Structures are given as structure tokens and as C-alpha cells.
Image: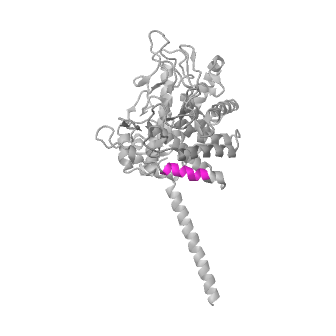
Amino acid sequence: MNSRKNILSWILSVVILITFSACAQQEETLQLSFSSKGKVEYKLDIDEETFLDSLQYRSSLFFLHETNPELGIVKDRTAVWAASSIAATGFALPVYAVGVERNWMTREEAANRTLTALNFFLNSEQSIDAAATGYKGFYYHFLDMKTGKRTWESELSTIDTGLLIAGVIFARQYYNLENETENQIRETASKLVDRIDWNFMVIKDAGKFQNSICMGWYPEKGFHDMGWIGYNESILLYILAAGGNLENPKNSYQAWVNNYDWRTPYPELSHAAFPPMFGHQYSHMFIDFRGITDYYMKEKGIDYFENSRRATLVQRQYAIDNPEGWKGYDSLCWGITACDGPGNSYNYNGKEFLSYAGRGTSGPDLVFFDDGTIAPTAAAGSIVFSPETVIPTLMNINSIYSPKGLWGHYGFFDSFNPTLDWINNDYIGIDQGPIVIMIENLRTGLIWNYVMKDTLIQKGLKSLGFETHN
């Protein structure tokens, strides 16, 4: 009898344990509700597949070659004088994984490169010293390629740290094998993510930027006088901060949303405007915004993915209309974003030309600066939003301008100006990254799939009031 009771008791315990486990799994599933929708539903033909293979591979080589292998940091650009960009380094981490998935490099090599970079950032100096690498878990925008120390008197940058950390979050999800290197990647990544003091960067002074996340901090003069408000690339920052230790994340997010600029430059293309195209791409490289919406976009009846699609089509329509009369602009040659330009030594009908500038347009009534300079990354980084228009554009640009010198070792050079018959001779890391990452998101959803799994991302989205929608 006692034996029978023991058996029944054991069975009951097992049933309870199974029930509890099932409930726990169900609760975890409910908590992790913002899953990626995976690759974009677009059928590539053979010619498109071949072209994207070449463009993606060539662009990825920048991150393999323009690095300090001992520190793992990546150059801002190919110029010999260039420093390291922490954002470009953040982009490199998923680019390495793309290389693994595309059989361009081994998983072991990618993991070692990743761990080298993570160890550098974890062990580099965090202090108020002007020659440190970072402070309060944030990092300086530009670092010396040889020493990893702050250079060019750059700011402790919130957005560039955010883009670096987005890559770190991808890495801690992607490298999920049980071996020494990948275990260390996950452990080191979590330490980097957890030590950021988001509250340090919240603007507390009354005024337009109150409660927003500050753009940066300088050891010589303190905080930057502006915060991140209005729609741009920094929505990622608010998600990261809300998933981290930010107090009152909804107050900060409210300061951000309150300054959106909703415009209708063309019929059916109303959107939260930001002229340079990169502002509609950088956060989307990591966050899959399809099917999720905050209160602002819910009222507009769209999500942020659709917002970026419309911004992409606005730029294309602007090129078709071509109000400034620049040569080359049309439905298959467009894309205005921050990039290099010809510089002021050129003159064309009294027009002004700049070197590096935050070019951009959200329609004819909202232009940051347009001097006829086109950047391939502006279209390529939007490939997930409108592949049916972006891919023909990239292939057309390649057909016409690559024979003239636009194509080099790392794929498309950063920019060109058909009006002046000018082609850049440099590559920029933060422009190469979106090409590789967004092509992969189109084809497989790789970066989205892993980043959206992360509990910090899930918490951040929930804390800011994001909801799923059909």
C-alpha cells in the first residue's frame, strides 16, 4: 500500500511539474510577443539574386579589412587618416554573422572577431578623463585606431553607443552555442549592455528637450545642448533605454514623440518626416517594426515600417520631379542622405556644393540640403521597405555609373554627382553597414530574427506602449 501511495505521489508530482513548466513556457511566450516576421516577401529573380550577392559580399569586405584586429574596432572610412567609428563597429558584428550564413567566413572566425571587439569595449577605460574610451557605459563617437582612446575631441555619443549596443545585443543572441568563445560572447555582451547608465543622459532642465535623451556629453564642457526629439534614427535609443535602467521611460518617449513632423509631400505618402534617408533606416536594421505600433502611429493607422516605406517613395518621387534640375535624377537614380560630396571647389550655375553633409529630402518643401549628390546606401538601406523600386534603382546605377568608376573593392563608392560627373573615392562604414544588413533582412530576416528575441528589446517595446496589430 505504501508503495502504491509513493507511486501515485510521484505521478502527481510529475503532473504538477509538467503543468507548471507548461504555464511557465506559456507565460514566457506571452511576454515575448514582439517576434520578427522574418524575411520580406519578395521573389528575387536570378539576375537580382546575382547582383545582390555581389553587392552584399563586396560591401561586407569593408568590415573585414578596415579594422584593428587586436582591438576589434572598425574604421569610420577607408581614408588613411580615419579614426574608428563605434557605430561602424556595431554594424560589423551582424555583418560577421551574415558572412557566416553566406559561407564567406567560418563561425569560429566571426566569433573570435566579435569577442575581440567586446573584450576591448568591456576592458577599455571608463572615466571622466578626456583620453578615456568611454564613461557611464557610453563610448566616444570616434576612437583612435591604434589605441582605442577618444580622438578628435568627439562627444560621448548616445546614438553611436546605441548602434554599437544594438550590434552587441545581436551578438549575444546569435552566438548561442555551448563553447568557450560563444559563452564568453554572451557573458561579455550582457555586461556591456547592463552597465549603461541611461539616466545620466536624460535632460532634466526645463525647456524643449526636457526628459529627452541628450545627444552627448563632453569631458571639457558637459552635456550637449540638444536632446533626441522628433522622428529620426534614434527611436532605437528609447527602446534600449526603456529596456535598460531608464527611469520614467514613457516621459522620455513622450518628449521624443511630441516633436514629430507629420507631412504629406505627395498624395498617399503622409509620414513622420526626416529628410536624410538614414534616419528611416538605422533603427530598422535591428528592430522589426512590422506589425507593431505605438500610440502615435496607431492614430495614423500605420506602423514605423510603413512610415519608412513612404519616406523611401517620397525620395524617389522627388527625384522624378527633380525641382532643382540636377542631372541623372529619375525613377531609377535617386537617394539623398548624409554622405561625402564634391566640395566647394566646384561651381555649376552658381550652385553651392559641400563635402560631407547631412543631405536629405522629405519632399520639395522639406529639404535639408540637395546638391545633386546621390549615395547608393540611401536606396540600398531601404531595400526592405520597397524592394520593387530599390533593386531596379541599384541595378540601374550599377549599369550606368560603375563603368565610370563608381564600383570598387568594397562595392559602390560612397557617393557620386552626375551633374558634375564626380565620383567619390572613399567608403564610409556607417553607409556600408546598412547595405549588407538590410539586404540580409530582405533575404532571410537574420538580424531582425535574433535582435527581436532579446528580453531587453521586448521589455523596451512593452515599456513604451508598443502593441501588435494586423
Residue visible at 47% across and 29% down? Answer: 276
- Percent across and percent down for residue 375 are 54, 25
Residue visible at 43% across and 48% down? Answer: 197
Give the residues drawn in magenta, as a range: 184-194
The secondary structure that dominates the magenta segment is helix
Q: Residue most toward the left?
A: 206
Judging depth in this view, the residue of 123 and 406 nearest the camera is: 123
Chosen colour scheme:
one colour
Asked whether 216 falls inside the magenta stretch, the response is: no
Figure quadrant of the N terminus:
bottom right
217 to the left or right of 31: left
Q: Residue most toward the bottom?
A: 1
Judging depth in this view, the residue of 355 and 378 nearest the camera is: 355
Judging depth in this view, the residue of 188 and 395 nearest the camera is: 188
- Percent across and percent down for residue 69 are 63, 38
Residue 36 can be seen, yes or no: no
107 over 65 or under it: above or below: below
Residue visible at 30% across and 41% down? Answer: 205
461 to the left or right of 261: right
Residue 93, quarter of picture:
top right
- Percent across and percent down for residue 383 are 57, 33
Asked whether 187 falls inside the magenta stretch, the response is: yes
Total number of numbered discs in the rendering: 0
Residue 410 can be seen, yes or no: yes
163 over 16 or under it: above or below: above
- Percent across and percent down for residue 59 are 63, 31
Q: Residue most toward the top?
A: 349
